[in-house]
Amino acid sequence: MGGLQTIINVSNGLQIDRRKVVGVQVSRNEEPRITQTPTLNPWKFTVEVPVVFKYSDARALLESLDYSDRIYPEIITFSDNHKLNWMFAYQGQMNQSQINGITVQSFVGNQLTLTNLPSIASTKVLFKPNDLIQIGAAGVNPYPFTSVGTVLRGTGTTVVVTTNRPNIITASVVGNGIIVGNACQFNMFCTNMPTYKLTVGGYKKIGNIVYNNALIQFSDSFKLYEMVSLA
Amino acid sequence: MTSVIPEVVNVPRINTAEFVSLTVFNEYGNIANANTYTFSSAYKSEVIDGLTYLPMGGLLGIGNQPHDLRVTSADTSISLSGIGANNISLVLTHKVRGSELKILRGFYDDNYILGNVYPRFTGIVTGYVIKEDRQNQDDTYTVAITASSYKTVLENRTAGRFTNPSSWRFFNPNDPSMDEVPSISGRAFDFGKDPQGYNGPAGMIANPPRRDRGGGPGK
């Protein structure tokens, strides 16, 4: 398990920033005008970490964070343990094998067209707002999109999902499968990589001997930024 | 001349990206020997007039482009990230000064599909600056290109022709009007005064009659 995934798993606060690059001006008669730049719109997380790690148990974690620094990305997911997998949980009505059968017919702009749909009732919900969709197999394109609205199965051979951001994947995605919900992955790196302080505590007792130890206190929350330049 | 841009007329919301084309001329007098670099602030590659504009992550910003009712001598600047060093290499290893810079503005619809594209700035690169900003463990490079509009270029242009044979024959190779200029160059010559003691080349009248005085030999 990578260092950032461990940090995610123990976090006690997560701030999600998906804001677009937008300028807003209000005219003299208070009429708003908005201009947007069509960016890659990366995911940005701010992860708060409590003081939970004992130095003696966290040596590997510290080394992993020190090595990654603000340089290397890491693929993280919210399905890693039962404490987190309620986040980004899939809200639709397909089962896993039905999801596995779906492929991408096209993905132009923010219009994702899916085909090879399951034979289920037309009123069944394929995606609800905020459902995560990842294109391709695990680890291939760890740049999830969200469904903006509710998508019903309908009667056609395809459905069109309006995604939160345009297709930022440079390789062709036609024919790829999809991953949904908390199984989706994020390719994140830490832009500030907090330093850490060892404070007295966490004494370790082995047999009748008490060993000195320390608790790990990070200098700041972890600001994670999606490595979209690799998409 | 006015140009109506429907994407911005009576709409509360626009989605726009800027596309930059930098044509670097490698050889003086040979415009065919040039490299064109294209990049944009868009999220993906876009093809405009046969040129593919890359969604270069290095494009940090485009400076102000003043617009005026009159033609103005506006300058603009483009900031590029030096991270990756490609952009530092671009300005250091190429003759980037004097390159032609074009900035286009493209408008996207709500589905992030590029629609119309309009020219925004055309000019000549007049300089560049490479800055390194290192604070503690944070190190950033920025390459800034400054460009002048064509109006400034035209203002600085030397117009007309010189009164020497080469300049004169540049426009008409058979025009000998200035061929004798080098021979009198640097000599004191009082225009309007009667020539004194000078016998010109064969065929010239040494002391031609002055018509304003009714003819007759000169003194």
Image (cartoon, coloured by chain):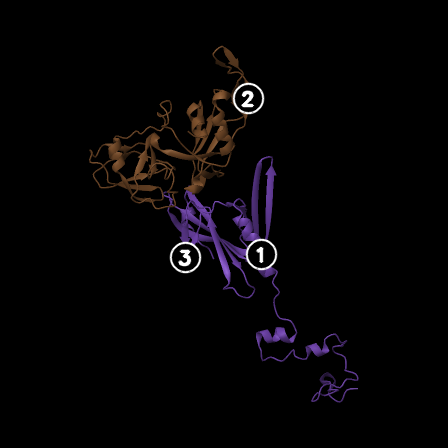
Chain colours: A brown, B purple
Asked whether, in this view, residue A185 is left or right of residue A95, the answer is right
Question: What is the CA distance from the residue labelled 2 to the residue labelled 1?
Answer: 54 Å
Q: Which residue is mark 1?
A: B97
* Mark 3 or mark 1: whose residue is earlier in sequence: 3
Chain ID for label 1?
A: B
Query: A104 or B65: which is nearer to us?
Result: A104
Return the x and y of residue A192 as percentages of the image width and height. 52, 32
Q: Which residue is mark 3?
A: B50
Position of A158 relative to B124 (above/below): above
Q: Which mark is residue A198?
A: 2
Gap in angstroms between the C-alphas marked 2 and 3: 59 Å
Left or right: where B95 falls relative to B46: right
Q: Nearer the viewer, mark 2 or mark 3?
A: 2
Q: Chain of mark 3?
A: B
Q: Is residue B7 above or below residue A2?
A: below
Tell me, yes or no, whether dots 2 and 1 are on the same chain: no
Where residue B96 sits, quadrant-wise, is bottom right
Q: Are marks 3 and 1 on the same chain?
A: yes
Quadrant containing the C terminus of chain B in the rendered view: bottom right
Discs 2/1, front:
2
> Which amino acid does the dot numbered 3 rest on?
Gly
